[in-house]
Image (spheres, grey):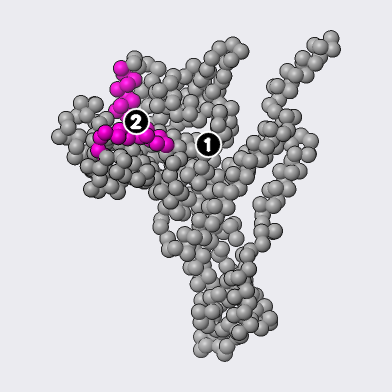
């Protein structure tokens, strides 16, 4: 079963003369273990797509389905609960709450979900170790580098039962080496069974994806699937 | 890729015979440029003709080792000191193709751009996949070079597309053109 599915999704902003078709009939399915990158010029609908996938916006027509649940069938609190339990976000910056430590930031969504702090804490610490930040539990965001903060954000996005990560230019503020390390981590989390949608304008980062979707004017114009046959490619590189 | 200079660089470390050169070359470039043994021998023959390497007596096993000459060392030093000219890069064909696409009737330039973008992105994805297994530094540098080239091509394609939008209004979507024509008809009527 797909973790995320967009079925013939349309999103129109405004009405009449000021009507803007942000998305026009987009269908995408993302399976567990799959990283999908979305590229396109500004105004192509990338952000709208991510907002719809995250339940922050609803389609004018069509449906968004997360792990078998059609978001359109949920009431407000149902939607909020699903967002909290099933998916995590990673943004360009301002991912973490400045007044909470790394471990508290990661434990927060668990605690909001009713997990007791004494149970949430060990989960948060384990998640930190998984992203290579053993010993950082008590650090505050401003005591960590940009790359380390993004690692914490990725750990938080996938803590507990979450299997869908939505990332919006997660490497935007980082230098190229740190950005690559963040992508490697994201990739390894996906290889371990998560699903992720990555919006980026950096081709080098999108290239970590299994599929790259090109959006233009609200329509998927093309999809590039990396084949596993890298050896054949090298034959032709000379 | 200069196989000639690649072989000279390998021989600078000590004498080697054909098969050794081939496997050393491939190990060094992470098999990015596979050589066939014929290419190696043809190149060695030419290098010997030009006085840059010298063939030594055959081993018992029938393999003839080669060593680099003083002239060969000079040639190698010159190679390292000279920047690579990018005149014959395959991308030039792409530039020419796009330039011609602009002026050839009936060609959808945007789709030419997108077709290339998808293909280049696929290449980039495959190189990136190879990056997952951390290799030795020389191999990673070769791979990074290919990755940056592919990325540069994608950025250039984005640039082309942006230029198309700005400067060639005739390539705007068909419906707009059709409705504009309709309006003209109404005006004339």
**Residue B165: image location, x then y, percent:** 67, 32
Q: Quadrant of residue A187?
A: top left
Q: Tag 1 or tag 2, which sits nearer the N-term?
A: 1
Indicate which disc residue A39 carries: 1
The residue nearer to you, when weighing A5 against A218, is A218
Q: Residues within 10 Å of mark 1 (few under 14, many from 20)?
A: many
Q: Quadrant of residue A217?
A: top right
Does the stretch in magenta take in B111?
A: no
Q: Does the image show residue B125? A: yes
**Residue B107: image location, x then y, percent:** 74, 36
Residue at left offset 49%, top offset 22%: A9
Residue found at the far right of this picture? B188
Q: Chain of mark 1?
A: A
Measure how far apart labels 2 and 1 are at the Cα level.
21 Å
| Location of residue A236 with respect to A152 vertically, above or below | below
State which region is magenta: A77-102
Check the picture and name the quadrant holding the N terminus of chain B. bottom right
Answer with left or right where residue B153 lies relative to residue A2.
right
Secondary structure category for the residue under label 1: strand
Does the stretch in magenta take in A88?
A: yes
Q: Chain of mark 2?
A: A
| Location of residue A97 with respect to B51 vertically, above or below | above
Residue at left offset 36%, top offset 41%: A150
Q: Does the image show residue A25? A: no
Residue annotated with mark 2: A87
Residue found at the far top of this picture? B189
Q: Quadrant of residue A191?
A: top left
**Residue A59: image location, x then y, percent:** 47, 19
């Amino acid at each position: 079963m797909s973790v995320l599915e967009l079925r013939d999704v349309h999103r129109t902003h405004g009405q009449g003369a000021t009507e803007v078709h942000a998305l026009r009939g987009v269908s995408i399915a993302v399976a567990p273990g799959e990283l999908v990158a979305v590229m396109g010029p500004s105004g192509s609908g990338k952000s709208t797509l991510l907002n719809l996938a995250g339940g922050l916006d609803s389609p004018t027509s069509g449906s968004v389905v997360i792990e078998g649940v059609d978001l359109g069938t949920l009431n407000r609190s149902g939607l909020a609960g699903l967002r909290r339990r099933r998916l995590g976000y990673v943004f360009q910056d301002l991912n973490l709450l400045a007044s909470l430590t790394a471990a508290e930031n990661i434990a927060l969504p668990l605690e909001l979900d009713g997990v007791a702090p004494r149970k949430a804490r060990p989960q948060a610490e384990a998640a930190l170790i998984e992203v290579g930040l053993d010993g950082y539990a008590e650090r505050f965001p401003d005591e960590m580098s940009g790359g380390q903060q993004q690692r914490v954000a990725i750990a938080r996005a996938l803590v507990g039962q979450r299997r869908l990560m939505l990332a919006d230019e997660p490497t935007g503020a980082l230098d190229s080496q740190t950005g690559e390390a963040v992508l490697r981590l994201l990739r390894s989390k996906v290889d371990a069974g998560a699903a992720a949608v990555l919006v980026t304008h950096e081709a080098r980062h999108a290239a970590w994806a299994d599929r790259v979707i090109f959006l233009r004017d609200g329509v998927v114009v093309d999809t590039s699937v990396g084949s596993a046959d890298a050896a054949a490619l090298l034959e032709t590189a000379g | 890729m200069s196989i000639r200079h690649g072989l000279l660089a390998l021989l600078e470390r000590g004498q080697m015979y054909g098969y050794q050169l081939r496997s050393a070359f491939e190990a060094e470039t992470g098999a990015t440029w596979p050589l066939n043994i014929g290419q190696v021998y043809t190149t060695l023959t030419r290098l010997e003709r030009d006085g840059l390497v010298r063939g030594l007596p055959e081993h018992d096993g029938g393999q003839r080792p080669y060593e680099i000459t003083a002239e060969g060392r000079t040639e190698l030093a010159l190679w390292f000191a000279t920047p690579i000219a990018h005149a014959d890069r395959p991308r030039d064909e792409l530039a020419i193709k796009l330039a011609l696409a602009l002026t050839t009737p009936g060609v959808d330039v945007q789709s030419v751009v997108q077709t290339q973008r998808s293909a280049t992105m696929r290449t980039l994805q495959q190189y990136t996949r190879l990056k997952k297994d951390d290799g030795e530094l020389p191999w990673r540098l070769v791979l990074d070079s290919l990755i940056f080239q592919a990325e540069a091509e994608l950025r250039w394609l984005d640039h082309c597309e942006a230029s198309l939008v700005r400067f060639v209004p005739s390539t705007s979507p068909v419906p707009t053109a059709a409705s504009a024509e309709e309006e003209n008809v109404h005006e004339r009527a």
